[in-house]
Image: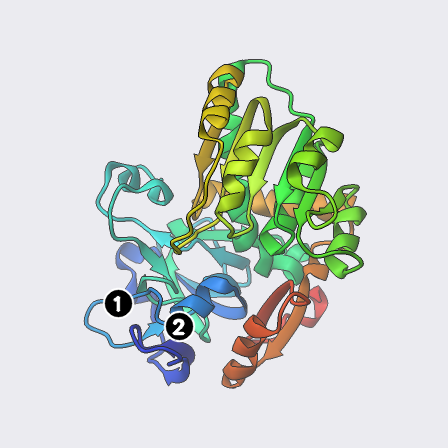
Amino acid sequence: MKAIAVRPGSPNSVHLAELPLPRLEDVAGGRGVLVRVLRCGVDGTDKEINAAEYGRAPEGESILVLGHENFGQVEAVGAKVAAVHPGDFVVATVRRPGTSLYDAIGLSDLTTDDVYLERGINLRHGFLTEFYVDAADFIVTVPARLSHAGVLVEPLSVPEKGITQAFEIQRRLRVWHPHKAAVLGAGSIGLLAALILRLRGLDVTVFGQRQPPFRNVDLIEELGGRYVSTRTMPLREAAQVHGPFDLIFEATGFSPLVFEAMDVLGKNGVLVLASVTGGDRRLEIPADRINLGFVLGNKVAVGTVNSNREHFEAAVDDLALAETRYPGWAASLLTHRVQGLENYRALFDTLTMGRDVIKAYMEVAPLPDADR
């Protein structure tokens, strides 16, 4: 079968590979699920792996199959699988258990291992291929009515985790009822975070550098949120007008903004940090003021990465709720479709096309006509 892969350590090595078809027997104990891949999204992670910035092939192999934003349909299940059936639409989680206590209790996204096992990212093949097999424990079903937006479940699970953690942490306050939230970054993750927060009834302000008009602003306003360009109104000034912010979700990839967010976060507020930054930026900050504000204001900052089954299931629930409250909104994020694995170069070209690409994906196989 065909697959889109790289040779880890070799920049710009993305290519079309041939792999053997997976089998149910590849998963022990009759727990296997064979899935035909329908769609697979790409993002900056795939771009960085192709640039050889990180990522390793499975042990004993020379290539890594890319793709973690997956969506497919079940072809067959093992004898011990009861909750998943042939014909079901499904998404697979990305991280696989390591050796820590957290891995053993189903929280591999919180592992203390130094090496992560992630499908399509590190040491495990991904989903930019025709079929895959995985254990039923890592398979999440998606209602057929959401199949048109099912490829968004994995990226949506990322802000689901961060926002869930924020609410869990704030149980310390016993009566925390957040009213205002800020989302820093108007890309796909920022838009999905804004969706989750609006579904929870918060007043949401999304910040970005780009000045309107552009499509992302329309999407934010369709949710009942507002967009602020920091070129027009800096974050500190905007916090005076639209805050105080009870929750800030940071998804810009620009680490200096973290400290500005710490400074403007409201009392008893929580700051969720979702950007993975691998640079070496340095800056001067008003350290005493930020520290004092956190201490006297009982503020919290928490980092979040990856997600587990709970967050994938929450993403499915929120996609269903969004389809009721904002019909068609989620699917409109899928701005760039490329058909056929052999067109992998066109798919990767979308990662360099700039700001008009919200979410690009490969249509590996067409969705069943009845569910388009």
Q: Residue furthest left?
A: 60
Seen in the picture, residue 182 relative to 265 is either above or below; the reply is below
The amino acid on which the numbered mark 1 sits, given as a three-letter code, is: Pro
Q: At x 55% / y 48%, what residue is drawn? A: 251
Label 2 crowd bin: few (<14), some (14–19), many (20+), radius 10 Å: some
Q: Looking at the image, can residue 78 be seen?
A: no
215 and 97: which one is in front?
Answer: 215
Give the mark nearest the N terminus, 1 or 2.
2
- Of tags 1 and 2, which is closer to the observer? 2
Foreground residue, 333 or 145?
A: 333
In percent of width and height, residue 7 lies at 31, 77
Query: In whole angstroms, how far apart are the C-alphas of marks 1 and 2?
Result: 18 Å
Question: Which colour assignment does the render follow?
Answer: rainbow
The part of the image, by quadrant, that contains residue 18 is: bottom left
Q: Amino acid at mark 2?
A: Ala
Q: Position of residue 274 (x, y in %)?
A: 49, 45
Image-based side of 332 in relation to 190, left or right: right
In depth, the one of 372 and 100 nearer the eye is 100
Question: Can you say which quadrant of the picture contains the C terminus?
Answer: bottom right
Q: What SS does tag 1 mark?
A: loop
**Percent x, y for residue 303?**
43, 39
Residue 195: percent from left, percent from top: 67, 44
Residue at left offset 70%, top offset 50% = 231
Q: Quadrant of the N terminus?
A: bottom left
In the figure, is residue 331 to the left or right of 28? right
User: Does residue 253 appear in this view?
Assistant: yes
Circle on res. 147: none
Give me the residue at 49% from left, 27% from top.
290
What crowding class fits label 1: few (fewer than 14 Cα within 10 Å), some (14-19), or many (20 or more)? some
In the picture of the structure, the residue carrying the numbered disc 2 is 51
Q: Find disc 1 in the rendering and name its residue.
A: 58
